[in-house]
């Protein structure tokens, strides 16, 4: 079985840089280090308020790093124009509100067909694959298929935040969501809040092909360095994947 791809979300290197307004630490330099440590792709979220990633970062991540770029963004005209200019490998559409600390819930796809269908085809027309960040809810996953998405990224936040039986129930929702995506022919990713403790169990779900992880790896890199944090995450992902191979 293919290894679970690790997409490193680089946003919070930019958060630290922006705390002092200068150029250090550079998210592009961090992405290059992460590439050496074995990440499979880079994710960056250009928010409307530019609180971490800036426009110039997105262009540099695309042109200087040499890894597939997953451009996370709200479904706005401003972002579509930037994406069409940058031409990332994929765009991951997320809901966005100014007040939130981070992306809080999945995109409401069901009922948004009139807005999303033309938006998605505009990106696909220039060769960008489109991913929708959704809760592991069959209604949203089926709607993602209906609006023409290539990929869904399942929201792992509730799974990570729950404990005990509630966490097991959230994991089952992710597993069923991934199975439904596979039946519908959607590529399935997962992300948000994943850490060393929670990554193995999602890596054991065979239909998930990519995990996008940011805050934990960037935080851990303060302790052990970015390369070591990436390598440890990779080791745990591979251990989880091994279980998938054994049981499938
Ligand atoms: N995937 C999506 C769609 C996200 O919005 C985020 C957070 O920006 C991530 C993955 C990465 O989450 P975290 O930084 O908690 O690992």
Image: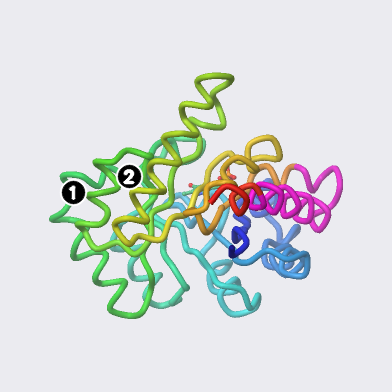
Q: Is residue 207 above or below residue 59?
A: above
User: Residue under circle 1?
Assistant: 112
Q: Residue at x 54, y 23 (%)?
A: 162
First to last magenta residue range? 220-242
| 85 sits left or right of 159 in the view | left
Badge 2: residue crowd in 10 Å (few <14, some 14–19, many ≥20): many
**Label number found at residue 125:** none
Q: Residue at x 73, y 42 (%)?
A: 219
User: Residue under circle 2?
Assistant: 107
Quarter assignment of residue 130:
bottom left
Image spot of residue 73 (x, y percent):
41, 56
- How was this image coloured? rainbow
Q: Is residue 154 above or below residue 86?
A: above
Q: Is mark 2 within 8 Å of ligand 1?
A: no
Label 2: which secondary element: loop
Determine contact: label 2, label 1, CB under 8 Å: yes
Main SS class of the magenta portion in the image = helix
Quarter assignment of residue 66:
bottom right
Badge 1: residue crowd in 10 Å (few <14, some 14–19, many ≥20): few
Image spot of residue 190 (x, y percent):
50, 49
Q: Is residue 154 above or below residue 125?
A: above
Q: What separation in Å lies between label 2 and label 1 (alpha carbons)? A: 10 Å
Sooner in the amino-acid sequence: mark 2 or mark 1: 2
Q: Residue at x 44, y 68 (%)?
A: 90
Image spot of residue 98 (x, y percent):
41, 40
């Amino acid at each position: 079985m293919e290894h679970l791809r690790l997409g490193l979300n680089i946003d919070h290197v930019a958060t630290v840089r922006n705390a002092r307004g200068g150029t250090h630490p550079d998210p592009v330099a961090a992405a290059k280090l992460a590439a050496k440590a074995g990440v499979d792709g880079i994710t960056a979220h250009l928010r409307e308020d530019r609180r971490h990633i800036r426009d110039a970062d997105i262009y540099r991540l695309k042109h200087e790093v040499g890894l597939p770029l997953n451009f996370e963004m709200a479904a706005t005209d401003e972002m579509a124009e930037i994406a069409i200019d940058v031409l990332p490998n994929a765009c991951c559409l997320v809901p966005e509100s100014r007040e939130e600390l981070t992306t809080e819930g999945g995109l409401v796809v069901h009922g948004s067909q009139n807005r999303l269908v033309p938006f998605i085809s505009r990106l696909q027309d220039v060769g960008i694959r489109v991913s929708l960040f959704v809760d592991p809810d069959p209604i949203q996953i089926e709607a993602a298929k209906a609006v023409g998405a290539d990929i869904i990224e399942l929201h792992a936040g509730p799974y990570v935040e729950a404990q005990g039986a509630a966490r097991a129930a959230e994991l089952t929702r992710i597993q069923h969501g991934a199975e439904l995506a596979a039946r519908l022919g959607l590529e399935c990713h997962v992300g948000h809040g994943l850490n060393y403790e929670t990554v193995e169990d999602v890596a054991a779900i065979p239909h998930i092909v990519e995990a996008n992880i940011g805050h934990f790896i960037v935080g851990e890199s303060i302790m052990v360095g970015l390369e070591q944090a990436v390598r440890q995450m990779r080791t745990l992902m591979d251990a989880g994947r091994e279980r998938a191979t054994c049981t499938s």
